[in-house]
Amino acid sequence: TVINTCDYNQTKAATIAIANYKGPVYLRFGRPKVPVFTPENQNFEIGKAIQLQDGKDVTIIATGHLVWESLEAAKILHEKGISADVINIHTIKPLDQDAIIKSVNKTGCVVTAEEHNYLGGLGESVSRVLASNRPAPQEFVATNDTFGESGKPAQLMEKYGLTASSIVEKAKRVLKRK
């Protein structure tokens, strides 16, 4: 089981859920500071995605601190007349396939956002789900098969394109392929 939380409250809830879980769990969280935006006493269900925003034009599926960036991107897209479905995939394995398929059935395209290599991560897992169940155009916001560097989190996120503006650009690109 692989869990990647998006803020302090979700990390706290995940830790409690993990303590009661039977089996090995890897809990991952990023270095960048993000606002605390999830409910304080949330129910954390391992393997169950959370829809944070309802939209009809594009699905944004994110994990970790890129969930916050995705919400920021959704605001920018809204100003441009684009409605985004934003899904928080806090559990990478097992993956909530039903949430992915349901959202992409509605929007017809997807952007995945993760602080990870685009190979072998959330984006590739979403691609497998879509290829088997509901093929759709997809764009990736992730590192481009490279080793990371040391530095300040904000500078590194900008360097590797792990930002709200990158998500907006990928959303506009995937919409053209819809």
Image (tube, rainbow, N blue to C red):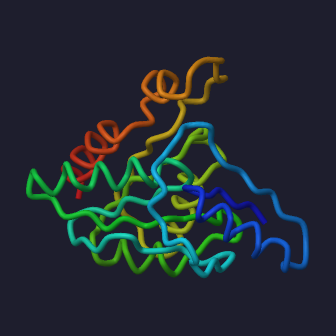
Left or right of 69 on screen, residue 107? left
Left or right of 100 on screen, residue 64? right
Which is more toward the observer, 19 or 117? Answer: 19
Residue at coordinates 54% horizontally, 65% vertically from top-left?
89
Left or right of 144 on screen, residue 74? left
Residue at coordinates 27% horizontally, 49% vertically from top-left?
171
Quarter of the image for the C terminus: give it.
Answer: bottom left
Which is more toward the observer, 153 or 61? Answer: 153
Q: Position of residue 10 (x, y in %)?
A: 60, 65
Among all residues in the image, which is located at the extreme front? Answer: 40
- From what the image shows, is residue 65 above or below residue 106? above
Q: Position of residue 51 (x, y in %)?
A: 42, 74
* Number of dots carrying numbers: 0
Quarter of the image for the N terminus: give it.
Answer: bottom right
Q: Position of residue 2 (x, y in %)?
A: 74, 60
- From what the image shows, is residue 111 above or below residue 128? above
Q: Residue 141, located in which quarter of the rendered image?
A: top left
Among all residues in the image, which is located at the extreme right? Answer: 23
Residue at coordinates 8% horizontally, 58% vertically from top-left?
81
Q: Position of residue 99 (x, y in %)?
A: 48, 78
